[in-house]
Image (tube, rainbow, N blue to C red):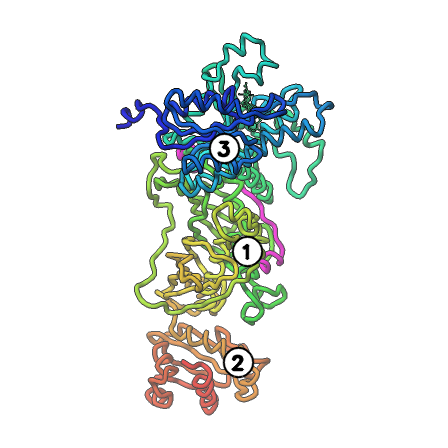
Amino acid sequence: MAAVGAALPLRFDGKVVLVTGAGGGLGRTYALLFAERGASVVVNDLGGNIKGEGKSSSAADRVVEEIRAKGGKAVPNYDSVEEGEKIVQTALDTYGRIDIVVNNAGILRDHSFARISDLDWDLIQRVHLRGSFKVTRAAWNHMKNQKYGRIIMTASSSGVYGNFGQANYSAAKLGLLGLSNTLAIEGQKYNIQCNTIAPTAGSRLTQTVLPQELVDALKPEFVAPLVIWLCHESCQESGSLFEVGAGWIGKLRWERTLGAIVRQEDQQMTPEAVRDSWDQICDFENATKPKSNKESISNLYEVLNKLNTKRGVSTNPTSGSKQTSTSGINPAEAVGKKIPFTEYTYTNLEPILYALGVGMTTKDPDHLKFLFERNEEFSCLPTFGVIPAQGFMNGALASIPGLNIDFTKVLHGEQYLEMYKPVPTSGTLKSEGVIADILDKGSGAVILLDVHTYNGKDLVCYNQFSVFAVGAGGFGGKRTSDKVKVTKNPPNRPPDAIVSDVTSVDQAVLYRLNGDWNPLHIDPNFAAFGGFKKPILHGLCSMGFAARHVLKQFADNDVTKFKAIKVRFAKPVIPGQTLETEMWKNGNLIHLQSKVKESNEIVLAGGYVVLEESIYKAKSNDIGMREELQSDLVFAEISRRIKDIGKELVKKVNAIFQWDITKDGKTVGQWTIDLKNGSGELYKGAAQHRADTVFTVSDEDFIQVVSGKLNPQKAFFAGKLKVTGNIMLSQKLEMILKDHAKL
Ligand code: NAI
């Protein structure tokens, strides 16, 4: 089929073509050729002289007669292109439509630059640039509505390269190229294509500049077929520039040197640095050929990322935009490549900023220990562990050989974080990265980037970043790897707990201060560029929200219990939306998924948190807690109540209670409720001041009692609840549990 199609002549039956300046030269040749191939042609020509003076209908009439004499369809129009609407109206009035516009009309008013008068300048701009604009605009909506259109702009090598004596003309001609480039973009979804030609042909215009032999030899017929092809419905070319003449056609495009980054982060950019890098800036070896504004800007984005990859990730400034030029992954070269150690030095400020970034607030008194450096229990949120490592995902990846991917099409797919030690609240951490594996997913590649972070010799945490490079698949790699930290689907039952938090409209603006400077999270233009309506929240920020929800719900905000987290970033979150974390407890594994409440869309999928028992053990006075106790949940609830109304309880109760929780006869947990000192508190472990009453009860019976299923007196007499000390005070305790625990 394809072969037959290719052999068919290019026909324009039923199509209506408008050629401006078609009374002679190139325009006439186009008009004749279109008509010969079945098109109905509007032959426009003002009929003035080469300088744009005077007018006459004879030029257009002659060509129309010529076409009609050959049996073709044509109608004349004598308006100046500056009155584009009228010319297009001729097409509509005569043929009822307009399919193709060839902007060809032109004049010359050549002078060396100093001698160009205002009129010389203005007239050239008006005929070439404004005229093409007016005609094309008049046709545009018709093309849009019929979802078909072909447009030609006529530039000139004088514009592309410059030409002595043609400053006005060069400016207008290259202006047309800019116009064409944008029309190609805007017309794309309506099947409107726009291309530009820079022709050379003998005509009355070139008679003044070319020797007669060349004028005779360079026939307009050696240009016209290109225009015919570009305007055919089977041609898919758009937004391109061609040089054409003498039967030869060549395509032009932009080329850009690799260039050089001539500044350093946090330092001024100086003219001297520009001078000193001049050879490199201008060196076309390994040059790239950016095809779009997006590609061009993505280079700048990479540069910013490189510069922002703080604390010494080594970047090679000369590798500036290499990765945008080619695409392709070579696992053999990249997997196992280490990314050298980087240091991350921080004070108390950074963990506090991070806590604020993931939505912590003093509205919740529990959060104070993450927000106030002088709080007794001042701690760093475990998920702060991603911060020293995050730089590896940006600039550092770009420096890996064998990873030739388009960094504008890189998505953060999944994240795994495992803790070995609580993250210190200040200090210097060292991180080292390695490309753990690369998976070929067809539509893209998944790059597994493992980063280990150390405090001195101690491993603090391990991150696995799953980076999805769109369009980089199909390199013949494997689909899975045992290196992957896999997500886990939540159980098929309603969640055990749901916590929601409204993010602030400035959540991303705040979160980025943790060192992720991607403009996607703050710059509306940049976000629009990536296809988002608004700047989006950092995936790691949503993860921070979910992690602290679990930490509070199931670990009493005890950071030492937080062992690991895994999430998949399923959908973007817009700052201001409500994040709702659903949690399912399954032993020490907490399944999680986060939704945007407003849309009910899952944004973090297949997530889980592992709570570590061994760390838990060490913290709770070495009492062997082999598994999490049901009573822990009750105490978490009591703790919240005490925080709410502790002062009042201290007044009413004025006693210290200790609970020894047993399992199989052994004490596995200890809790103290101090309603005597300060404003009341609940803590893990034996009473620090002498307890007034000590209760000993099994985990199961404790739950039975507080849920009202087992009467405490009966439990006492049945030997299920042992009480030592002031037994009368237990009545007051019952009151607390009943009135305030609401269990
Ligand atoms: P040409 O002078 O033979 O044709 C231009 C036609 O445009 C003339 O018939 C003229 O009456 C008409 N025209 C001038 N102002 C007009 C207006 N305001 N409204 C309607 N019609 C108007 O010249 P040629 O060489 O055929 O040029 C065609 C186009 O190709 C021009 O845009 C020219 O700048 C461009 N070009 C030609 C080159 C060549 O080697 N011939 C080189 C580079 C560009």
Q: Quick one: which residue is furthest to the right in this view?
A: 114
Confirm if mark 3 falls within 8 A of ligand 1: no
Give the mark nearer the N terminus: 3 vs 2: 3
Residue at image x 39%, y 63%?
A: 590
Q: Is 339 part of what is drawn in magenta?
A: yes
Which image quarter has ligand 1?
Answer: top right
Q: Which residue is mark 2?
A: 674
Q: Is residue 189 left or right of residue 513?
A: left
Dot 1 alpha-carbon crowd within 10 angstroms: few under 14, some 14 to 19, many 20 or more: many
Q: Which residue is mark 3?
A: 291
Secondary structure at numbered mark 1 = helix
Q: Amino acid at mark 2?
A: Asp
Q: Is 368 part of what is drawn in magenta?
A: no
Across and down, in percent, residue 442 comes to 34, 40
Q: Amino acid at mark 3?
A: Lys
Taking 570 as reference, is 319 above or below it? above
- For the C terminus, give its image quadrant: bottom left
Real-space Cα distance between discs 1 and 3? 31 Å
Real-space Cα distance between discs 3 and 2? 70 Å
Secondary structure at numbered mark 3 = loop
Image disc number at residue 544:
none
Dot 3 alpha-carbon crowd within 10 angstroms: few under 14, some 14 to 19, many 20 or more: few
